[in-house]
Image (cartoon, rainbow, N blue to C red):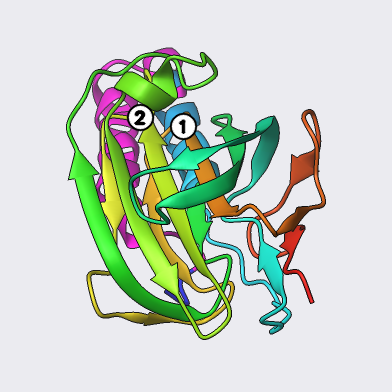
Amino acid sequence: MKSFIIKDGFVIILGCFVAAIVLLLTAGPAWAAFPFALALFMVFFFRNPEREHIQDDTLLLSPADGTVMDVSEFYDEEYLEAPAKKVTIFLSVFDVHVNRSPARGEIKYQRYTCGVFRPAYKNVAVLENERHAIGIENELVKILVIQIAGILARRIVSWVTLGCDLKQGQRYGMIKFGSCTELVAPSNVEILVRKGDKVKGGITVIGRLAS
């Protein structure tokens, strides 16, 4: 995970560069321009920047880069089994797509759900699209983080499983291309962002635990 490029993108990037070279040699520069430009975009998309994270158990960090689509309250029946607050973050194809753990803790819950691939910015996507959820718990809090596929995101990637211990800000997976990530926290957590805010994974403080 120290690589500047996520390993899941190596084959795609290499394929684009090979296609560009073949077309350059057989058909000329004009034909090679598109796959070469696509290869450069894939390098940009699969970037994996190093970030310095705070380590504070009283704070919840953003699980993804993107724009806050919604902040809502509801009763979570999936993991918390209690009143909860949910922050929904939309990731465009220009955002870093690595997902990071909002808090330190052990993965006590994991669920993958098959679904359709509607645009991630539509509200119905969080209910109908393919998704992968992990429940993280430590001595102070239990939270749920959900990766949701979009119309272009056809694969959710996870590098962790049940029983794994995560550090705050640690990379645990990604969603290939446009997508959505949700953070579900207990109702007593103070949410510090609102709809329309830009957030950065592992950097932006999403919530503060009640003292």
Q: Indicate yes or no whether the magenta region holds residue 164.
A: no
Residue 167 visible, this angle? yes
* Labels 2 and 1 touching (C-beta < 8 A): yes
Taking the image as shown, residue 100 lies to the left or right of residue 87, namely left
Taking the image as shown, residue 15 lies to the left or right of residue 135, namely left
Which residue is depicted at the point 52% across and 42% down?
A: 182
Q: Which mark is residue 179?
A: 1
Which residue is depicted at the point 17% across and 31% down?
A: 114
Within 10 Å of the Cα at label 2, are there few (<14), some (14-19), or many (20+) other Cα atoms? Answer: many
Q: Residue furthest front?
A: 82
Quadrant the C terminus occupies: bottom right
Residue 22 in picture, x, y percent from top left: 24, 30
Range covered by the magenta-colored residues: 4-33
Question: Quick one: SS at disc 2?
Answer: loop
Say which of 82 and 10 sits in front. 82
Q: Amino acid at mark 2?
A: Ala
Residue 38 in picture, x, y percent from top left: 44, 29
Taking the image as shown, residue 101 lies to the left or right of residue 113, namely right
